[in-house]
Image (cartoon, rainbow, N blue to C red):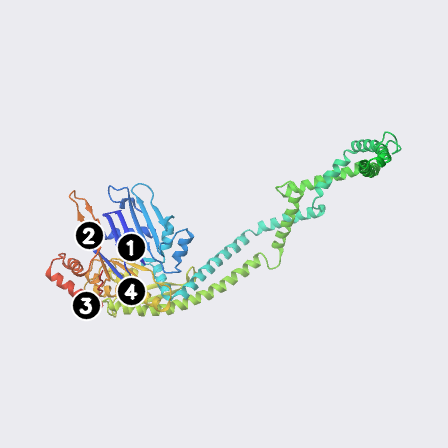
């Protein structure tokens, strides 16, 4: 529900605090007093378009703040939490600032948020009905939504599932069409990948081979330099012919080891050095043997060198042809992906066959869901027509009936297999005509109210989810007399299930309110229209005077006051006291 709305410098309103209660609240006042600005402020809190022209003349900005209290677990709380909004004792604080020049600003729970987020939060919290909504009731789409809503949550869940399947089926069909249109491209892709894999398999490179070939090419291309370096090292360690030659490193180390060993009996420190020279001698002997083996196997092999160069060139050519990289790893990765793609293009049951099967599966599910929707709409249509007809009788339209007509579509559409149209028979014996053609503004107002009351009763009986707050802007347009009394009665009935806020000019409707707010306008000495503290709750004699003003234009009229007292004294009429 909405607990309060604070407005500053919006239109003719300088400052107003509107406190709201559960039940039925009516807002009345003279034309131009600012009732429209109250609804404009609420629209801003619900993410409506900001109009800089609505800022009070001479002010820099207009501000509207609201306090909304969603029930526990309401989707609006989830949306707000995801946006980082904080709750204030269970309430959502919403604010909107409209600059006379510049951009508007929106805040939710103390966080700056996009305007659209306010609309998302308020979508399930508040339902606003203005005269434009009565016009929308003429559209088939709006009529279908009303029927689906009346059908209940299970039906709406089926509808959501159907729309997902419908979209998936359309997507699968588009993919199948694209597959058929691109068949030549796939054939060319398969041929190209097959040729590439054949070339790679013919060469059969292995991981790391490019590095091995590069090292071998370096060795074979520099045999003489390697022989000279290894030979010089071999000679330095072991002499030219004899490792025991005096100039050889091995002979010198052995001589040093023997000298130290001979003197070690006189000093223990020499023993450790003797052992270390033993190790060096063994290492030099091993190194001498390895250099000898290396020199023995180091031969020039021009033929092998040519083979190495050719294989390296072949690998490089494949890398450049099939990859954007420059290493053998890139080529091997391409080969892995190419083989997977070839399998995908040639596997039995894949490709086109898989798409055909997917389309057929979705079509079957879609038809089953559409049949369930059709059955649900047929049952809901009969029940809604009966319930709404009863409400229309109570709204001073005796004999009027609502007809819910469904027409099969030639093929399934995004919302099922039929069009939905609401027809109204205005009185007994009158032909049923589409709401968009035969209903007057007053009749549309009453049909809309009858639908809302019927839907509220059904939801209250069948669902645990709370109803949104309903806001009606002159729902009683084109209505008068006994019909106005019945409109007030139905609004009061709706208010038994949820919070209802009504802007009205009819005293018959206002008399049913649990809380009556009046928007007043005063004029300053300078001729400026202001409404400081201009929205106030009226009770007792003040309320009677407001109803008298609405009846006759004169709040002091004795006759009008008596009539107002009679309206308030009727059974079922609200009697709110502050």
The answer to which of 355 and 32 lies nearer the viewer is 32
4 or 1: tag closer to the N-terminus: 1
Name the spot of residue 49 as percent of width and height, x first: 32, 48
**Quadrant placement of the C terminus:** bottom left
Q: CA distance from mark 4 to mark 3?
A: 18 Å
CA separation in Å, label 1 and label 2: 18 Å
Q: Position of residue 447 (x, y in %)?
A: 28, 63
Residue 75, numbered circle: none
Q: Secondary structure at mark 1?
A: strand
Based on the displayed image, in which of its 4 quarters is residue 463 positioned? Answer: bottom left
Q: Which residue is mark 3?
A: 570
The secondary structure type at the circle numbered 3 is loop
Let me know if residue 49 appears in the view.
no
Percent from the top left, x then y, of residue 12? 23, 47
Name the residue that disc number 1 marks.
4
Q: Find disc 2 in the rendering and name its residue.
A: 520
The residue to which callout 4 is attached is 494
Q: Earlier in the sequence, mark 4 or mark 3?
A: 4
Between the residue at mark 4 and the residue at mark 2, the CA separation in whole angstroms equals 27 Å
Density class for disc 4 (Cα within 10 Å; few <14, some 14-19, many ≥20) is many
Distance from label 3 to label 2 (Cα)? Answer: 27 Å
Q: Is residue 193 or residue 536 the one in the foreground?
A: 536
| Left or right: where 496 falls relative to 229 | left
Mark nearer the viewer, 4 or 1: 1
Across the whole image, how many numbered discs are drawn on residues?
A: 4
């Amino acid at each position: 529900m909405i607990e309060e709305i604070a407005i500053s410098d919006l239109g003719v309103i300088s400052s107003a605090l509107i406190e709201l209660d559960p039940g039925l609240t009516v807002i009345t006042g003279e034309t131009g007093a600012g009732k429209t600005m109250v609804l404009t402020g609420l629209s801003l809190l619900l993410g409506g378009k900001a109009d800089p022209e609505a800022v009070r003349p001479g002010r820099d900005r207009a501000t509207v703040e609201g306090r909304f209290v969603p029930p526990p677990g309401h989707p609006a709380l989830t949306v707000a939490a995801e946006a980082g909004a904080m709750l204030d004792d269970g309430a959502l604080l919403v604010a909107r600032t409209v600059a006379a020049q510049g951009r508007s600003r929106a805040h939710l729970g103390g966080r700056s948020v996009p305007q659209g987020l306010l609309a998302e939060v308020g979508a399930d919290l508040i339902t606003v009905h203005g005269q434009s909504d009565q016009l929308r009731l003429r559209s088939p789409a709006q009529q279908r939504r009303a029927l689906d809503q009346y059908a209940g949550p299970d039906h709406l869940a089926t509808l959501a599932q159907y729309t997902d399947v419908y979209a998936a089926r359309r997507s699968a069909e588009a993919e199948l069409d694209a597959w058929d249109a691109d068949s030549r491209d796939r054939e060319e892709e398969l041929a190209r990948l097959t040729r590439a894999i054949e070339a790679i398999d013919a060469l059969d490179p292995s991981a790391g081979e490019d590095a091995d070939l590069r090292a071998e090419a370096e060795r074979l291309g520099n045999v003489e330099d390697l022989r000279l370096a290894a030979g010089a090292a071999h000679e330095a360690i072991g002499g030219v012919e004899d490792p025991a030659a005096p100039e050889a490193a091995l002979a010198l180390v052995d001589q040093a080891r023997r000298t130290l060993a001979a003197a070690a009996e006189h000093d223990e420190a020499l023993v450790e050095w003797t052992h270390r020279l033993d190790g060096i001698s063994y290492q030099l002997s091993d190194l001498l043997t390895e250099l000898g083996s290396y020199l023995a196997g180091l031969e020039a092999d021009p033929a092998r060198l040519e083979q190495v160069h050719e294989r390296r060139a072949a690998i490089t050519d494949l890398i450049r042809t099939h990859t954007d990289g420059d290493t053998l790893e890139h080529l091997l990765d391409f080969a892995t992906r190419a083989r997977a793609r070839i399998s995908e293009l040639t596997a039995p049951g894949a490709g086109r066959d898989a798409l055909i099967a997917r389309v057929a599966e979705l079509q079957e599910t879609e038809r089953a869901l559409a049949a369930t929707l059709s059955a649900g709409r047929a049952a809901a249509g009969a029940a809604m027509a009966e319930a709404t007809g009863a409400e229309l009788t109570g709204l001073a339209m005796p004999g009027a009936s609502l007809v819910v007509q469904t027409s099969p579509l030639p093929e399934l559409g995004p919302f099922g297999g039929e069009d939905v149209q609401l027809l109204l028979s205005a009185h007994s014996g009158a032909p049923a005509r589409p709401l968009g053609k035969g209903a007057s503004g007053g009749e549309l107002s009453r049909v809309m109210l009858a639908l809302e009351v019927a839907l509220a009763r059904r939801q209250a009986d069948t669902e645990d989810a709370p109803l949104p707050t309903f806001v009606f802007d002159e729902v009683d347009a084109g209505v008068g007399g006994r019909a106005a009394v019945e409109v007030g009665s139905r609004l009061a009935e709706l208010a038994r299930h949820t919070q209802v806020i009504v802007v009205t000019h009819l005293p018959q409707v206002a008399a049913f309110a649990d809380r009556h707010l009046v928007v007043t306008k005063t004029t300053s000495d300078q001729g400026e229209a202001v409404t400081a503290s201009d929205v106030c709750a009226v009770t007792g004699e003040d309320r009677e005077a407001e109803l008298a003003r609405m009846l006759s234009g004169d709040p002091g009229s004795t006759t009008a006051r008596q009539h107002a007292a009679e309206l308030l004294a009727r059974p079922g009429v609200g009697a709110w006291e502050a």
